[in-house]
Image (tube, helix red, strand yellow):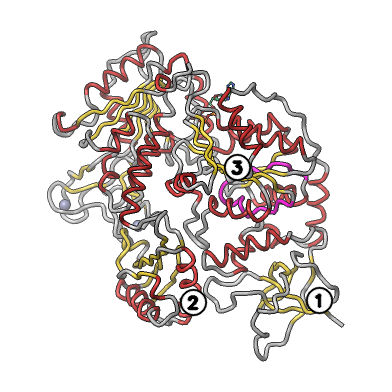
Amino acid sequence: MPHRIAVVVPTPAHSSIGGPLSYLSELPLLPGTLVRVPLGRREVLGVVWDDDSAAPPDRPAVETRAITGSLSGIAPLAQQWRQLVTFSANYYQRSLGEVALSGLPPQLRDLDSSQLARRLKRGAGAAGDEPTAAPLPLTPEQGEVLAAFEAEPGPFLLFGATGSGKTEVYLQAVLRMLQRDPQAQALVMVPEINLTPQLQERFVARFGAGNVVAMNSGMTPPQRLKSWLAAHSGAARIVLGTRMAVFASIPHLQLIVVDEEHDPSYKQQEGARYSARDLAVYRGKLEGAKVLLGSATPSLESWQSAEKGRYRRLLMASRVGSAASAEGSFPAVRLVDMNLQPKNTVFSPQLLDAIGQRIARGEQSLVFLNRRGYAPVLACTACDWKSECPNCSAYRVFHKIDRTLRCHHCGYTERVPRACPECGNVDIAPVGRGTERLEEHLGDLLAEVKQANGEPVRIARMDADSTRLKGALEQQLARMHAGDVDVLVGTQMVTKGHDFRRITLVAALNPDSALFSSDFRAPERLFGLLMQAAGRAGRDAAQAGASEMWVQTWHPKHPLFTNLRRHDYPAFAAQQLKEREQAGMPPFGFQALLRAEARTQEAAQAFLKAASAAAQELDGADRVTLYSAVPMSVQRVANVERAQMLVESTSRNALQRFLAAWQPVLQASREKGLIRWAVDVDPLVI
Ligand code: ADP
Ligand code: ZN
Ligand code: ZN
């Protein structure tokens, strides 16, 4: 007599099959077992799910089919893992199958049992190499923080200045836990793939290569499978990864670290739009693992949780190696009032002079501008032609290096035309500037400046373009560390995480747009960015005193800069939270976005309007506010029109209940011309 089992399978985002499907199996299979099952005409990977008697009765008139086989070499996924998946699917309004399957390494889908058995055998042999580095003696602040961390349950928010030694706290928190429990495992998350190699190096040195596995989207499918199997089997004690790692199967998980917890890249921006930081906190509670969030500029959500006592705040105010007075060890902030500069000034003379002094002393400077390419627009000087993208409501960016116009939204790339395509005028000119042009301009400005040894100045650029090729980033970082660069120009990429020892000047050229953005999170992001950037300067204690952070701005009196000058994140946060509270914005209110994509803007909005009208009938509609449907800020991308509608509530639960009730209504919609739609819960960008 075959057994009837529930199996979660990959289903299209908005099919009506949300939950598990029924299959037959000769053998009883434990929930969490990986199986292969027929689905339509395909065979797919599925996960045996808990038999949920509340699930709707079997689909009518379809014969229940038998599973094809089970991956018996792999232990079933734990109940907590399944709970995490269920919670995520419900909370972020996606199907169980999508969330479950996207949490598994893609190669599991493709390998047959014998191939898998070979992989399992190969993985098992890797003995843990010995650690090569010993723990550092803790600073008094690190010692206090670790003691508090050991003594209390958390979750913890480690509010630690840049350079205060947060990584050492993570390393030793992990070390103590591993020593206490020979099975325990830890999950350490970082925001950027770029930052994983250096952190991985430190963890490997401390714990041995066999104990540490990485998990990020830059890895090949075989590498990802190998890491996943090592974590799932318990062999790897430490999983180090980007946001996707929050779904890793880690059966003996006891500690979760979320480094730079404020970073927007913890929020997935497509498919299931989950926040890995928020899920880390949830997962910690679920599995009884301690959660440690760390940042020099916490997200206002986390900061507010600490203010309310939901998180335990741990403080490290001073930089490692600095004298007891914290003030002196952070770079002085210099604001240049651009109202007092001649028109079209890019580098104020003061800033140039300061950079020149650094060069003469053999110190490094870092200049950043949040725009890559040579110029954001190319324009004809005779008619009104501009380098618009034919597929998007955006300009294509001029990249001088390969003389292309590239759309940063859809990727559409063309050679720069010899003459204006509209009027034939040969005089077409770049408007505005990106990092490429900045690098060139700085080269001109510093042409006469020499290093102490009489050699010319070395300027380098680091952004998504310069680091596209494999190994390029590592090479550029190595040049920087070796002191082979005097001035590094880059996008915000250069401001994150890197422990450059010789930088004594950091300059933000043009950060003003964030001050008056319609995005209410823009000031929070800017403050974080500038604090992180300032954190790159003077990391070598011997030079900390002479380090400077320069900001060129048209609004030097803005309160954001006042708090920046004092390195006063708490004052900035208090001011922002007050504004948010008055406006009922997160973390005081809760939001979701309904997004729609269609052939025409009308169709996209019609879908949203119909959804809004239908919502009025639903239970709990009185506890949410539905705003009007509006075009997205970049309205058309790759010839698809985009619109969105904001939903708000003062209660997270009320919002969740409403979204659950709304979901079937949205799925039933048959708006003509609609291509896709999605709900984004707790959206980061509105
Ligand atoms: P954060 O992540 O807080 O910005 P890091 O962890 O990068 O700071 O630490 C800054 C620097 O201080 C690093 O070079 C690190 O090796 C060093 N450091 C950290 N803790 C100690 C310690 N206890 N003793 C000596 N050096 C330390
Ligand atoms: Zn023209
Ligand atoms: Zn485009």
Residue 260 is situated, as x and y percent measured from the top left of the image, at 50, 40
Residue 346 is situated, as x and y percent measured from the top left of the image, at 23, 31
Answer few, some or many: residues within 10 Å of disc 3's Cα (few below 14, many 20 plus, some between 14 and 19).
Answer: many
Dot label at residue 25: 1
Write down the residue under mark 2: 661
> Is the Cβ of the residue at disc 3 closer than 8 Å to that at disc 2?
no
Specify the segment rendered in magenta.
235-251
Query: Which of marks 2 and 1 precedes in the sequence?
Result: 1
Residue 492 higher or lower than 381, as above or below: above
Write down the residue under mark 3: 257
Callout 2, which amino acid? Ala
Q: Tell me if residue 470 can be seen.
A: yes
Q: Is residue 53 left or right of residue 400?
A: right
Residue 380 is situated, as x and y percent measured from the top left of the image, at 18, 48
Label 1 or label 3, whichever lies nearer to me, is 3
Residue 42 is situated, as x and y percent measured from the top left of the image, at 67, 74
Towards the viewer: 23 or 543: 543
Query: Which of marks 3 and 1 precedes in the sequence?
Result: 1
Quadrant assignment for ligand 3: bottom left
Is 248 one of the magenta-colored residues?
yes
Towards the viewer: 635 or 623: 623
Q: Is residue 242 left or right of residue 80?
A: left
Q: Residue furthest top?
A: 453
> Tag 2's secondary structure?
helix
> Is the Cβ of the residue at disc 1 closer than 8 Å to that at disc 3?
no
Q: Is mark 1 within 8 Å of ligand 3?
A: no
Q: Residue furthest right?
A: 1
Residue under the point 72% across and 44% down: 185
Query: Which quadrant of the rendered structure holds the C terminus?
Result: bottom left
> Tag 1's secondary structure?
strand
Q: Is residue 410 left or right of residue 417?
A: right
Callout 3, which amino acid? Val
